[in-house]
């Protein structure tokens, strides 16, 4: 039996959930037997719980969590269980959900033209993919998701901002599933507040007609994820 029905209530970070369910990356754990009642999906530091929080497997999955995790749940019952087990280690992390249903493509086109003087925007190729970890931040292309820079270029997508041939900002697909990707944008501290993240995000948004969660890129607020998709909690070691 497929564990996907246990996660139908999750709407936040849906590409990550589907990436695991569809076998692209990550791990899935559920109770034994063919009738899955409680399950956990994990990708990097993200953990999702689904199913029946009163099932014995649910408590086992929550209890065995260690280290620093971002935990996402879709019901108050799961949230209550996590707080009961981990108590003061939990740090709430409310999130905002955006919708691309009324995406303003004309706004994206305008933002793409606002490249600051001295910077160039280019699509990530193999050479840039090999450099991103060194020049922007290590771990941006998670090995759990992309087997290598070549794998990212073959199956992913991204855009970079460069100045003096140095990568200073990038927007890339952090994870992918059959129908969507999760987009991650990072800018070096010394180059922030120049509009670079907006430009590379707009470039990627236009290339995909996808959804980066940012109202500045023409997306509309749907409602807080803590209400729309259930509470989000953070577990810190």
Image (cartoon, rainbow, N blue to C red):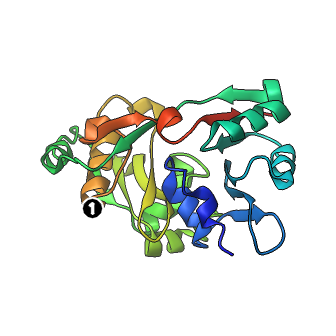
Point out residue 195 in the picture as x, y percentages from the top left corner. 29, 35
The answer to whether one can see residue 84 in this image is: yes
Question: In the image, is residue 148 above or below residue 194?
Answer: below
Q: Nearer the viewer, residue 9 or 72?
A: 9
Question: In the image, is residue 6 above or below residue 167?
Answer: below
Question: In the image, is residue 22 above or below residue 164?
Answer: below
Find residue 40 and report its image quarter.
Answer: bottom right
> 10 Å neighbourhood of mark 1: few (<14), some, or many (≥20)?
few
- From the viewer's perspective, tell me whether residue 20 is left or right of residue 121: right
Task: Assign the C terminus to one quadrant of the image.
Answer: top right
Point out residue 165 in the picture as x, y percentages from the top left corner. 36, 52
Q: Nearer the viewer, residue 56 or 106?
A: 56
Q: Residue at x 35, y 41 (%)?
A: 197
Q: Which residue is mark 1?
A: 207
Task: Assign the N terminus to one quadrant of the image.
Answer: bottom right
Question: In the image, is residue 197 above or below residue 87?
Answer: below
Find residue 119 and report its image quarter.
Answer: top left
Point out residue 63 in the picture as x, y percentages from the top left corner. 86, 44
- From the viewer's perspective, tell me whether residue 87 is left or right of residue 170: right
Q: Secondary structure at mark 1?
A: helix
Q: Nearer the viewer, residue 154 or 220?
A: 220
Point out residue 110 in the picture as x, y percentages from the top left corner. 14, 44
Q: Nearer the viewer, residue 12 or 153?
A: 12
Q: Residue at x 55, y 51 (%)?
A: 9
- From the viewer's perspective, tell me whether residue 10 is left or right of residue 63: left
Badge count: 1
Q: Residue at x 50, y 55 (%)?
A: 14
The answer to whether one can see residue 145 in this image is: no
């Amino acid at each position: 039996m497929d564990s996907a029905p246990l996660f139908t209530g999750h709407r936040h970070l849906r590409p990550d959930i589907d990436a695991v369910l569809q076998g692209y990356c990550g791990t899935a754990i559920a109770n034994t037997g063919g009738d899955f009642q409680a399950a956990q999906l994990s990708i990097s530091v993200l953990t999702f719980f689904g199913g029946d929080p009163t099932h014995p497997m649910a408590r086992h999955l929550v209890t065995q969590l260690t280290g620093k995790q971002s935990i996402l749940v879709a019901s108050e019952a799961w949230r209550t269980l996590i707080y009961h087990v981990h108590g003061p280690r939990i740090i709430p992390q409310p999130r905002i959900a955006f919708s691309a249903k009324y995406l303003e493509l004309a706004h994206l086109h305008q933002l793409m033209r606002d490249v600051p003087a001295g910077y160039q925007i280019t699509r990530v190729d193999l050479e840039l993919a090999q450099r991103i970890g060194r020049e922007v931040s290590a771990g941006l292309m998670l090995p759990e998701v992309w087997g290598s820079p070549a794998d990212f270029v073959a199956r992913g997508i991204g855009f970079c901002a460069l100045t003096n041939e140095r990568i200073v900002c990038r927007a890339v697909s952090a994870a992918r599933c059959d129908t969507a990707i999760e987009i991650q944008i990072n800018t070096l501290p010394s180059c922030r507040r120049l509009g670079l993240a907006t430009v590379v995000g707009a470039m990627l948004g236009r290339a995909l007609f996808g959804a980066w969660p940012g109202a500045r890129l023409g997306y509309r607020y749907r409602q807080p994820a803590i209400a729309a998709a259930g509470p989000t909690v953070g577990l810190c070691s």
